[in-house]
Amino acid sequence: MRDTLVLNASFEPLSTVTLNRAVVLVLQDKAVVEQSHPALRVRAAAFELPVPRVIRLCRYVRVPFRRQAPWSRRGVLVRDRHRCAYCGGRATTVDHVVPRAQGGGDTWLNTVASCAQDNHRKADRTPEQAGMPLLRQPFVPSPAEAMLLGMRAGERAELPEWLVRPAAAA
């Protein structure tokens, strides 16, 4: 099932919903379609609607402010696009830049996606001690960036340019 991006009335990304939920929100006049799939349509006996890719709520929803997205192993893999920070191959694990044995914690800036071989080779050493430089530095995604990064690559590529921020498009 396709993910549909939901924007607040102020055009801020809020979440993704299923196609069924997006259609219900549009039919109840709680949202409007901002972007739709060009060739796909939802048909019923009494109506026909383009399949929504992005919808915007008609009323503003107040969301508690979050400075950063909550850390998770899945979030690190998604942020790094399942690419190893050491060799660029397919990543299946999360590695601590400063190992937990040396006081490193589970934070966005201390964890990177890694393949099992490089994670095992680095062991409980820092990248400098292991002679394994990072190909790219870890960063802290904003909550909106984390949500956009979590969308499927094909769905994310179809989003309007004004919505995809540079960090999420990389």
Image: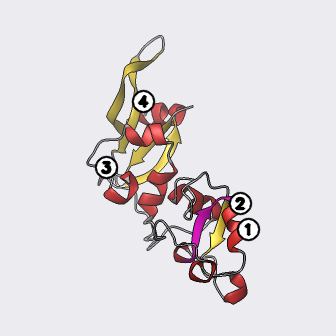
**Image location of residue 59, percent across then percent down:** 34, 50
Q: Earlier in the sequence, mark 4 or mark 1?
A: 4
4 or 3: mark nearer the eye:
3
Is disc 3 placed on a helix, strand or loop? loop
Q: Is residue 75 visible?
A: yes
Q: Amino acid at mark 3?
A: Leu
Q: Nearer the viewer, residue 3 or 55?
A: 3
2 or 3: mark nearer the eye:
2
Is disc 1 placed on a helix, strand or loop? helix
Q: Amino acid at mark 4?
A: Leu
- Of the 4 image quadrants, the one containing the N terminus is top right
- Of the 4 image quadrants, the one containing the C terminus is bottom left
Q: Does the stretch in magenta take in 130?
A: no
Q: Does the stretch in magenta take in 113?
A: yes
Q: CA distance from mark 4 to mark 1?
A: 52 Å
2 or 4: mark nearer the eye:
2
Residue bearing the label numbered 4: 27
Circles 2 and 1, Cβ within 8 Å, touching? The answer is yes
Q: Earlier in the sequence, mark 2 or mark 4?
A: 4
